[in-house]
Image (cartoon, rainbow, N blue to C red):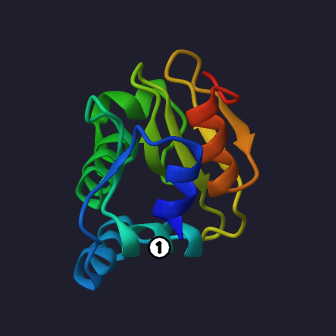
Amino acid sequence: MWKNYISSISKDYSFKPPTSNIEIAHISEELNVELPKKLHELYSETNGVFDSFDCPLIWSTSQMVKDNLFFRNFPDYKDSYMPFEHLLFFSDNGCGDLFGFAILNGSIQTEDIYVWDHEDDSRTWVASSLEVFIKGWITGEITT
């Protein structure tokens, strides 16, 4: 479903082999949150979505874990930014801003997507679902 959906918007994206259940479990263990259903479904089809320059539209699971842990644990950020434990990042704009789901009470309760702006530490709603985010980012309707 996801590969067909993305390809229907643009043929400029490539896909990796599906994510294993072990990799999904690793995300939950390392980041202490269950993946949203739609992101889990996407990873069941492909471990990341990449443009023609190999830049990710959707991060691989390993990048998701690495980058989320970095932002949550980097000592200098604790003094400069609000905590990151309330966001599950899965994508970026290539210029420092990150896209993610809000974590409320230890779980992701809505499909809403937010962007974290690295310059002013704002967290702004950008899309009502993963589908809307993907289409909006590919078509340029969502910009940061």
**64 on left or right of 39:** left
**127 on left or right of 32:** right
Which image quarter: residue 92? top left
User: Residue drawn at (65%, 55%), measured in percent from left and top?
Assistant: 131
Q: Which residue is mark 1?
A: 40
Please tell me which residue lies in front, 39 or 15. 15
Q: Quadrant of the N terminus?
A: bottom right
Q: Quadrant of the C terminus?
A: top right
Dot 1 alpha-carbon crowd within 10 angstroms: few under 14, some 14 to 19, many 20 or more: some
Please tell me which residue lies in front, 86 or 90. 90
Which image quarter: residue 135? top right
Q: Height in image: 66 above or below 123?
A: below
User: Residue drawn at (57%, 58%), measured in percent from left and top?
Assistant: 5
User: Residue drawn at (30%, 62%), measured in percent from left and top?
Assistant: 47
Q: Disc count in the image?
A: 1
Please tell me which residue lies in front, 141 or 68. 141
Relative image position of residue 97 (x, y in whole percent): 49, 27
Q: Height in image: 38 above or below 130?
A: below
Question: Is residue 52 in view?
Answer: yes
Q: Hey, what amino acid is under mark 1?
A: His
Relative image position of residue 71 (x, y in whole percent): 36, 41
Relative image position of residue 132 (x, y in whole percent): 70, 49
Please tell me which residue lies in front, 37 or 136. 136
Element at label 1: helix
Question: Is residue 87 in view?
Answer: no
Residue furthest bottom in the image: 21
User: Residue drawn at (63%, 31%), measured in percent from left and top?
Assistant: 139
Relative image position of residue 10 (x, y in whole percent): 52, 41
